[in-house]
Amino acid sequence: MEKPKYYITTAIAYASRKPHIGNTYEIILTDAIARFKRLQGYDVYFLTGTDEHGEKIQQLAENSKIQPKEYVDKVADEIKGIWNLMDTSYDKFIRTTDDYHEETVQKIFKRLYEQGDIYKGYYEGAYCTPCESFFTETQLVDGKCPDCGREVTQAREEAYFFKMSKYQDRLMKHIEDNPDFVFPESRKKEIVNNFLKPGLQDLCVSRTSFNWGVPVSFDNKHVVYVWIDALSNYITALGYKEDSKENNYLKYWPADLHVIGKDILRFHMIYWPIMLMALGEELPKHIYAHGWFLFGEDKMSKSKGNVIYADYLAKKFGVDATRFYCLSEMSFAQDGNITYDNIITKYNSELANTLGNLVNRTVAMANKYFDGKFTNPDITEEIDKDLINNALSMVDNVEKYMNEIRVADAVSEIFTFARRCNKYIDETMPWALAKDEEKQDRLKTVLFNLIESIRFIAVLLSAFMPQTSEKIFNQINSQEKTLESIREFGKDINIEVGRAEPLFVRIEEEKLMEEIKQDMEKQIEEANKENEVKEEKTNLISIDEFDKVELKLGKVLKVEKVEKADKLLKLEVDLGEENPRTIVSGIAKWYNEENLTGKLVVVVTNLKPVKLRGIESNGMLIAAGEEDVRLLTIDGELQAGTEIH
Ligand code: ME8
């Protein structure tokens, strides 16, 4: 029988900077869902990638004095590196600078224009540069960007518009008819109330103020609005084309699940479905808008040293511990919290104590009492039933939660069961059984039940902590890894375990926190350095800016003191023009008629005239020094009026 398909996507990350743990959370979450679907027997296609166009990225590249493509190549590599480090099992990594994607975006835009869904007009309104979005006055919050809270500026551009309003009713109906199209419910309601109910404005879908984007093919002064470009990735990655649709598109579209963060739900719940309606394509089946990781009380910022990166966590705690923390700490409909203290506490209690100890104790006992090798003689007692029932209901519950995308609840089920297993050890006291000759068979059954329970855990953990799951399979030496194999308890009759190796070594909190503190300080230092470089950079001017200053050689013809002004001299200076210019200069303390007349000096000739003591000054002499001021002159004799360059 052909496997049912499951197409799952993440948002594509902005290739603007190294992703922090919040962005990384999303790929870990999506990976857990994808792995679980594979376990359930789906033919999964898992897409992720990078969003690489837009004004912000162009500016960042300019700041680094490199081309935008070079900039995004570097960041995309970094993003992919972190996704790989975190063991995410994506099938495709799309970059919006990929040729096939750009071509298809151009075609989509052209088609929407030709069929009248996109038209040309002017945009005037409040614009948020970092979010690259225009807002109406009613959408602003306290006059600021409703998405990021930053200042907006007034902007007017010739632009193309998408007739969103045309599709409003159809979209509303779709949302009403498909209650699980978008979840959690609370986030869906927010968008319906704040954006859909007030009525959709036509969306500005092109920009002319920068050029790092996909050019509009029939009007290349414009680039395609970054959200139209980005959202299309979900179909271009499958080979969607106007005319020919590759197999992957036919096979996998519509998406079964778009996993995104709550801040970008508006784009996915309104613009994306409307684009698809206009193209006559099916809408995605589900959109899940997850919460955000908050970094303790503080907002995350490098200058506070509290930006947390996944590769750093992986170095300190391991990949699976990082995955575990992310997956278990963010509940279905709320935000999560991430602090080092909390990671350490959870690591020690859940990973080292609950799971690590269970596996370690059990495998060690199997080795100690039976050299790791025995069969189950089936000496069961009443108490075993509860353990077995718990194991089987864990499988049902995890599956139920995963079908509802309640990932944290699914993980929590597994750890609750691991605790139940530890309790079973306390209840059955294998060490006491071991001392009693007559209880050897009972001891085998107890250890068998534990190893089988651990196998259940390992099968389910393969979706969430794949490396740990593999390590457990190696220790219990089992190849029974399918979901089917844990629908029934007691499949593996022959036990032959490997060596007991600790899965998670307890962390010494104080020592690690000291290291982390030092690293945070380093982050602050780095941020300060970056800021200094930025400041230095803002002092730099381009050659064009320098070229605006007109400098010429002038010959001083006449020098007079200015009445009632000790510092000023009034000069007549020949600049090779028809008449000499009058220039007033504050150099009377160091120069006079005698030492200045006839000198060749450097003059700024295109300054706006100013009046000093009633005399109009038409230029400025250039000099060096504070206490002792010396005029700039030249080496040798050149004609007055010679340009300086
Ligand atoms: O939004 N906790 O890219 P992005 C959890 N390119 N998730 C977070 C988070 C946090 N602290 N911070 C960000 C974009 N995210 C667009 C998407 S899709 C066609 C285009 C999530 O790099 C965020 O909500 O800013 C988003 O889903 C993802 O990380 C990428 O964010």
Image (tube, rainbow, N blue to C red):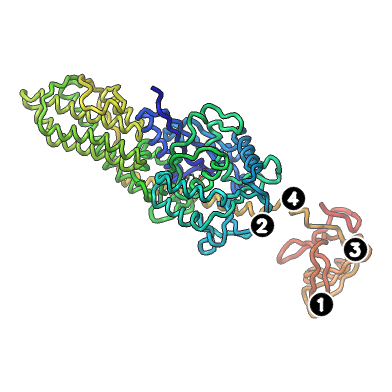
Residue with the mark numbered 4: 543
**Position of residue 229 measured from the top left corner of the image (x, y, whole percent):** 58, 42
Residue with the mark numbered 1: 614
Circle 1 SS class: loop
Q: Nearer the viewer, mark 3 or mark 4?
A: 4
Vertical order, 116 against 638 (above or below): above
Residue with the mark numbered 2: 156
**Position of residue 110 measured from the top left corner of the image (x, y, whole percent):** 65, 40
Vertical order, 497 against 258 (above or below): above
Ligand 1 closer than 8 Å to the CB at disc 4?
A: no
Which quarter of the figure has residue 180? top left
Instruction: Answer few, some or many: residues within 10 Å of disc 2's Cα (few below 14, many 20 plus, some between 14 and 19).
Output: few
Residue with the mark numbered 3: 574
Task: Check the picture and name the quadrant holding the N terminus.
Answer: top left
Q: Nearer the viewer, residue 460 or 504?
A: 460
Residue at 29% across, 23% down = 480
**Marked residue nearer the N-terminal end (3 or 2):** 2
Q: Nearer the viewer, mark 1 or mark 2?
A: 2
The residues bearing labels 1 and 4 have C-alpha atoms spaced at a distance of 35 Å
Q: Nearer the viewer, mark 4 or mark 2?
A: 2
Residue type, mark 2 in image: Arg
The residues bearing labels 1 and 2 have C-alpha atoms spaced at a distance of 43 Å
Residue type, mark 4 in image: Ile
- Residue 376 in view of the camera: yes
Residue at 93% across, 66% down = 579
Vertical order, 201 against 424 (above or below): below
**Marked residue nearer the N-terminal end (3 or 1):** 3
Circle 4 SS class: helix
The residues bearing labels 3 and 1 have C-alpha atoms spaced at a distance of 21 Å
Which quarter of the figure has residue 349? top left
Residue type, mark 3 in image: Asp
**Marked residue nearer the N-terminal end (1 or 2):** 2
